[in-house]
Amino acid sequence: MHAAQFQHDHLVHFYHLHALDWVDIVSALKADPKKTADLADNVSNAKVGGSAYYKQVQQRIQTFVDSGQLGPFSNAYWGHPAYKLPPEANLMACAHYIEALRLQARSARMHAVFGGKNPHPQFLVVGGITSVADLKPDRIAEFLYLQKETQEFIENVYIPDLVAVASFYKEWGAIGGTTNFLAWGEFPQGENEPDSLFMPRGLISKRDLANIPMAVQEKVAENVTRAWYEDGPSLHPYKGETKPLQEDPKYRPDSGKYSWFKAPRYEGEPCEVGPLARVLVAYGKGHKEIKPLVDATLQKLGIPAGALFSTLGRTAARGLETIAIGQAMPGWIMELLENVKSGDTQTYTPWEMPDEGMGLGLNDVPRGSLGHWINIEGGKIKNYQYVVPSTWNFGPRDDKRKLGPVEEALIGTPVADAKQPLEVLRTVHSFDPCVACGVHVIDPDSNQVYKFKVI
Amino acid sequence: MEKERSFYQRLKEKGVSRRDFMKYCTALTATMGLSSSFVPKVAEVFAAPVQRPPVVWLHFAECTGCSESLLRSQYPYIDELVLEVLSVEYHETIMAAAGHQAEEQLQNAIKKYEGKFICVVEGGVGTKFNGGYGKVGGRSFLEIAKDVCPKAAAVIAYGTCATFGGIQAAAPNPGGYKGVGEAIGIKPLQIPGCPPNPINLVGTVVNYLLLGKLPDLDDMGRPLFAFGNTIHDKCPRRSHFENEEFVEEFGSEEAALGYCLYKVGCRGPETYNNCPTAKFNDGTSWPVEAGHPCIGCSQPNFWDTMSPFYEEM
């Protein structure tokens, strides 16, 4: 189920939340459908294609544009000089944008099969899951074939599109990088966590891929100096406090508070979390599925491993882990089938709320490392703190004025037109933010400050 | 007729047969409680609107799960809704514009379509500290709601946060969050749920396009076609309730047999929604079918009034 979430989220992120930073829809209208078909045949194994198909997609876009109601595509940066794709590549990507919209609705059904619905599946309870009645061959087969359909699209469309688009934007292999990376890891394949995790746990300091120590939760602390909470020292989540200021918070980025995010730190350092962190940790550790995928992609694009520390690397890593996880899924599903076959349908362990206790859970979700910490007293929750992926990535500066990962990544981004900072969107979106956020662009020539909301 | 033919042609090219489409329209018509004579009219609405009705979708305090739910719509798929049925003028998640361009687009849309657009609100509205706990581009949700909602032809509060305040309104509600209706003193059409079933939004919009008015509502502003019965009324496990066949522990033999979830905390008897008949994700399942008790996610203030979850009512 969790792997299905990765497949679905990453697909939607690439096509529907990130692609239009790289793909110019308006330019697609100028494409030659036949040349587009040739291009698509050349780069992908997509099931649908051919010049008639691309002609039809182009006509559909043309009809939409001719209606004069541009809807969600109004007022964007079409024609911006930072768009580099030829019209044919733009048309191919637009067609796949629409295909992916349809596919994701079907992919999400994987969640509904065992989870009742998507979004917000309801089948998880403390102690296990509730959908024991769905552990039947027909439901397992339904899941298996939805997964197969999704994985086919990922391998034959998503990844070829990713590589084709990336080949026009190689300079983004030197833009938008950060320094430290944290992955709690995910997908236990046995009892001995964290060793059995398919996506391994680890910490990368100062981009050193040769030496990746195990990440330990004791070294996490959050700082609120620049966040809209009552001031206090950096605290480990077990001791964490959440005391929002009792006022209309004012935005004071220069020296005051400016964010609802706390600033999480690992041994005092900010860390990027997410697909790039997970893939770098796996790559550095010589992961037998991830390493060859990364090497082959670098070779295909003709770029060095150092280019992974970038916006391009982040967007590529998301696609590559989607393939690797998707390839592992059928094995996990067959394991479930074997259990069911042998009569093992244990899905729940009874439990009782303790009077006193502390506990934590660490894992990785599509956007990155997630940790929950709970403290129980008198049979009730006394404190509950979580440090979620977007807090790691989008957190503000701390008491030592250290920048958060996204803040760091944006430094040095070339911006062709400060009034239309498409380039800024590329890097911010590459982190897959769970929120809207604000970015201020200062034009060094005029010192004019432009404020942008990145959504 | 020409238009209609090309519409079915288009569907066919996308692998959707005319039969599939009519089946969807029949399901939608049934969900809305309309007679079957409306089926061809429902199909017409999707086939050839003269001008696509403009929609302004506002995001306040929410998780975007409601928008995500709409992305899961099948027949019509979301690309049909966006490209051919509606004109989504402003929607933070799916729109290509960002920053000033996005806010400018909002202003353009409400000016151009004043009194004519459908405003869909997703998320709760903060009222404490001048609405200061929730802002978009420096403007509070409260200010934006007061600016945009009165200019709409109709306001649809979509999801439990927009209708009743949602999770941020749960005690102690530090930001003073409320549903949009209560926050600014209007009476929107309300489609609660966490998230709602997209078929209920599509059904409401079709009703509007077809009959030129919103569907019949109950005293809380909820469409009766979707919220006229409790979960318990229509639950396929109802006979187990009558026979006193209950699940008392998850993962048990009774759970595997699909017995009634009343004793593990099901709130179906108090919750108005059409989950058992409409189901989610193209009819794949719904929470009770997955063995999970209903948590009453479409009822007012369910975080406070329906908890502790998993305990008998």
Image (cartoon, rainbow, N blue to C red):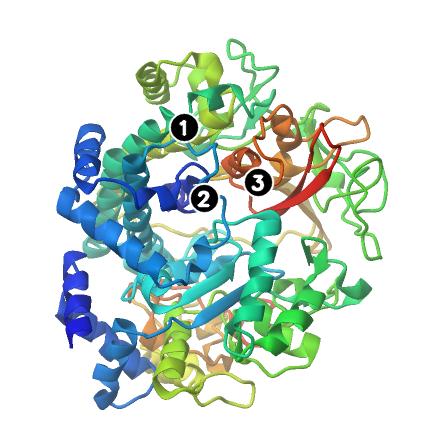
Residue A420 marker: 3
For the residues beneath circles 2 and 3, the answer to whether they share a chain is yes
Q: Can residue B305 be seen in this view?
A: no
| Occupied quadrant, residue A398 | top right
Query: Dots 2 and 1: beta carbons under 8 Å?
Result: no
Residue A316 marker: 1
Residue A78 marker: 2
Q: Which chain carries label 2?
A: A
Residue drawn at point x = 81 percent, y = 57 percent: A248
Q: Which amino acid does label 2 sit on?
A: Trp
| Occupied quadrant, residue B39 | bottom left
Query: Dots 3 and 1: beta carbons under 8 Å?
Result: no
Q: What residue type is labelled 3?
A: Gln
Label 3: few (<14), some (14–19) or many (≥20) C-alpha neighbours in 10 Å:
many
Q: B53 and B225: which one is in front?
A: B53
Residue drawn at point x = 61 percent, y = 16 percent: A205
Furthest-top residue in view? A210
